Image: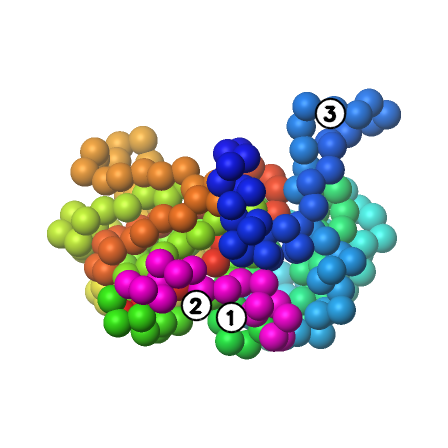
Amino acid sequence: MNKNNLKSLRHSIPAAERWFTYEPSSHGDQLLTAEEQLLLSHEYLSPFGDTILPYELITPSIDPKLNHDNLPLGDSNRENHELASILAQFLEHSNGTTFHRFHAPLSLFLLACKPPPSQRLTQLYIAQAQLVDLPKALRDDLPTPRLVLEAGKGDIYDSNLWMGIPPTYTPLHKDPNPNLFVQLASTKRVRLFEPGVGAEIFRGVQTSIRRPGVEGRFRGDEMMEGLEREVLHEAVWGDAVRGEGLEAMVGPGDALFIPKGWWHSIRSVGDDVTASVNWWYR
């Protein structure tokens, strides 16, 4: 972690400091002072627990009777059983799929983050939550960077929060506007391809699975599970990937500019809760 970057981030984007805490990691009775564990600040965020947000969840089973046995949970404990019971209510109509989208309160994410990392629900993602829909106090914690306000026409097309329990994943896609991507907590790995190269990769995947694709798609269900996800993931992240792309590791305090039309895919790194915010502008 670049401490200068983190210090600057906490000064310019208050969410980085107010929403998270860093505590020494422990192993049994032994305190590991050399490592820090990232935790959500329940004290700060709990008053906003009723805020409704868009979620994504990937489960290993398509069993409609969701419970502790077929959710990506760690060890059985009281919090996880409570979480499984709550999730079952939101996912009761998602038969026949392992990729689920639903809207639920922020309190669900706070509950999911309570157990130790080894016992947490995984692959729960607050994905593309528009900042405009957040309570004013939380919006104020995510002010628009001056770079965005002064770039181009200064017209913000959209801005979003991304916060999840790893592994989180965004498939290969391109944006219709320039994008400033800022990492708030933990680390993400980004692969980028210039427009022509990315389009060729995307068309190659569609040809191989014999499915016509629309290049403007973003987080379509078919891109998040099943054959298309597997082939698309391998084409971008597999061992045989060609060298035309670029790669960046984006940690707390890092900002990545993604030009309009450049293809990119993003993966979380590590086990700690990850959080990012982005601004599309014109």
Queried whether the magenta region covers residue 141, the answer comes back as yes
Locate residue 44: give its quadrant: bottom right
> Which of the pair 150/125 is nearer the observer?
150
Q: Residues within 10 Å of mark 1 (few under 14, many from 20)?
A: many
The quadrant in which residue 141 appears is: bottom right
Mark 3 — residue?
33
Which amino acid type is shown beneath numbered disc 1?
Answer: Leu
| Viewer can see residue 115 | yes
Residue 31 left/right relative to 112: right
Q: Amino acid at mark 2?
A: Ser
Q: Secondary structure at mark 3?
A: strand
Q: CA distance from mark 1 to mark 2?
A: 6 Å
Between 32 and 21, the residue placed more toward the observer is 21
Residue at image location 31% in from the left, 64% down from the top: 150
The magenta stretch spans which residues?
A: 135-151
Which is nearer the eye, 191 or 95?
191
Q: Is residue 148 magenta?
A: yes
Q: Are marks 1 and 2 in contact (CB under 8 Å)?
A: yes
Q: Are marks 3 and 1 in contact (CB under 8 Å)?
A: no
Per the image, label 2 sits on a secondary structure element best described as strand
* Marks 1 and 2, the one that precedes in the sequence: 1
Relative to 97, does residue 155 appear above or below in the rendering?
below
